[in-house]
Image: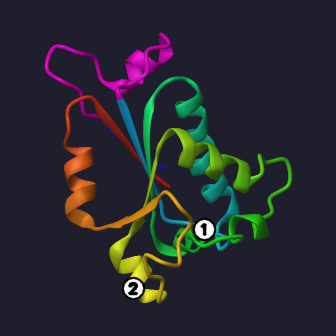
Amino acid sequence: MRLGRRARPGTEAFGAAAYRGVMPHTLVVKVTAGADAPERCSQAFTVAATALANGADVSLWLTGESAWFALPDRAGEFELPHAAPLPDLLASLLVGGRVTLCTQCAARRDIGPDDVLPGIRIAGAATFVEEILSDDVQALVY
């Protein structure tokens, strides 16, 4: 996991603020793992859903093998003992946050806009960079 520390001038970075219970304005989580690395994948979804439940504005990016979770019923196939069910985590993120499927990752898997779950957008690197370079944004990559 890598943490991007970016804060508006005059504010503390997320790391110090998180210990005092202050959430950043926006958290961007990029998931690069899927069923190929289940613990890393589950951690990403869990952190994103937990941040959302704690009032953060959350943007989850599905890249690499996690791209498959943009398709209906694919999250239901994911199993990891002692982990929150992936369909529940994804559903909460679709309701309260933003979920984006990487353009290139979708194309490599022949996934089009009509194939994905309602609420999932397909966007590329320019959109990702725009999100993570905004003020008060913290980025995590799993």
**Horizontal placement of 78 versus 111: left or right?**
right
Q: Amino acid at mark 1?
A: Phe
Q: Looking at the picture, does residue 25 appear above or below residue 33?
A: above
Residue at image location 22% in from the left, 54% down from the top: 129
The magenta span reads 5-25
Find disc 1 in the rendering and name its residue.
69
Q: Residues within 10 Å of mark 2 (few under 14, many from 20)?
A: few
Check the image and name the residue furthest to the left.
9
**Viewer-side residue, 3 vs 46:** 46
The answer to whether residue 48 is seen in the rendering is no
Q: Amino acid at mark 2?
A: Ala
Residue 23 shown left or right of residue 37 in the figure: left
Disc 1 to disc 2, how far (Cα)? 14 Å
Q: Earlier in the sequence, mark 1 or mark 2?
A: 1
- Secondary structure state at the residue bearing disc 1: helix
**Percent coordinates x, y for residue 98 in the rendering:** 44, 48
Residue under label 2, please give it. Answer: 107
Above or below, 28 against 10 in this view is below
x, y percent for residue 27: 40, 37
Q: Looking at this view, is 55 or 82 the one in front?
A: 55
The structure residue drawn at horizontal position 50% and vertical position 24%, both measured from the top left corner, is: 55
Seen as rendered, the residue at the extreme top is 20
User: 72 and 55: which one is in front?
Assistant: 72
Residue 52 falls left or right of residue 2 = right
Q: Helix or strand or loop: what does disc 2 sit on? A: helix
Q: Is residue 109 magenta?
A: no
